[in-house]
Amino acid sequence: MIDVRLVGAEAAPGVLGVIHAAFGARAPLDPPTSALSETLESVASELGQYGGLLVELDGRQVGSLIFEPVGSTLGLRRFGVLPEAQGTGVATALIAVAQEQARARGCAGMRVVARVELPATIAFWEHQGFVEVAREGVNVHLAKLFATSIDAHTRADTQAVAETLAPRLRAGDLIILSGDLGAGKTTFTQGLGRALGVRGDITSPTFVIARVHPSLTDGPALVHVDAYRLGGLAELDDLDLDTSLDDAVTVVEWGSGVAESLASDRLEITLTRALGDVSGVSVTEDHDPRRIVIQPVGLRWA
């Protein structure tokens, strides 16, 4: 049985024991990990400030981590699981409870640091939904930002969500829109274009693949792309656009699986038609709610 507990300074002996056992079992690194230099006093101080988690498996202490705020995210430090407990679900349980804590504390997501010499560790974090956001010497910084779900009960509500997002956008930003036919991707883009103050009517770009809408103010242009008929990024790169994607806000409809490598920092937005009742509003001919899920990717959106 896996038992994950939120702990403070009183749990320092147990957490320290896990840290030394877990990190001590890893292959030697150059420079060596600083985790093995932790003391009872240092761990107690860190737990006393921000808390941490201690995991028991069938009554034995086998995993732990220490929390640390990093900007708007919650850092997971000294994340360790004893070798004999790996593969039992302990690590996943630790991350699940850490995510609950991060949300409860109002954090935008979570961050961890892994060593570049440990590709299996980096792959583990990526499997858990973390993405690389920076490298600093031998350290790889990874972050997982939380998605936001919004119910838009009308077409105007869908556009209003986009209008709320628009002031946060800047040149070089990428938005990937996903959703079934008629889910509201172009409707969302119309609200975005209006709030950004760009020229021209925003319509589905299906037959022209891409349109550039220049700014009527001093803001960035809006590049509106339909990736449905694109064979890949090479075709997107070959488009004869009047502006660089670095100088514009780019919205790619049907972009999932095609446009992600355009930018490591992006917003992946999925629109779905509601089936049944959404927040007490039933689906009718005149009331066609959408659920809009905004998933930030990359530290830019923290």
Image (cartoon, rainbow, N blue to C red):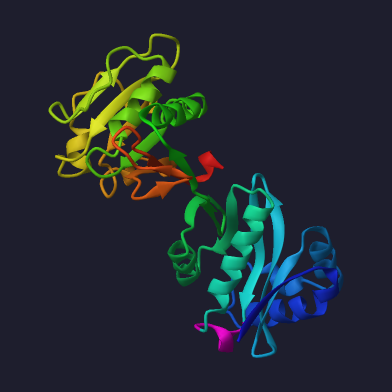
**Residue 227 in sight from this viewpoint:** yes
Say above or below: 88 vs 192.
Answer: below
Q: Residue 45: image x %, image y %?
A: 85, 64
In the image, is residue 84 part of the stretch drawn in magenta?
yes
Q: Which one is nearer the viewer's eye here, 302 or 97?
A: 97
| Horizontal side of residue 101 vs 206, given as left or right | right
Is the C terminus in the top left, top right, bottom left or bottom right quadrant? top right
Q: Residue 167: image x %, image y %?
A: 51, 24
In the image, is residue 185 part of the stretch drawn in magenta?
no
Q: Residue at x 29, y 44 (%)?
A: 179
| Horizontal side of residue 184 vs 298, given as left or right | left
Q: Which one is nearer the viewer's eye here, 209 or 79?
A: 209
Q: Which one is nearer the viewer's eye here, 299 or 114?
A: 299
Q: Residue 163: image x %, image y %?
A: 45, 25
Say above or below: 271 vs 115.
Answer: above
In this rendering, the count of numbered labels is: 0
Magenta segment: 82-87
| Horizontal side of residue 281 vs 230, given as left or right | right
Q: Residue at x 25, y 31 (%)?
A: 225
Q: Residue 9: image x %, image y %?
A: 84, 69
**Residue projecting furthest to the top:** 216
Q: Residue at x 71, y 56 (%)?
A: 68
Is the N terminus in the top left, top right, bottom left or bottom right quadrant? bottom right
Q: Which one is nearer the viewer's eye here, 219 or 182?
A: 182
The answer to which quarter of the image holds residue 176 is top left
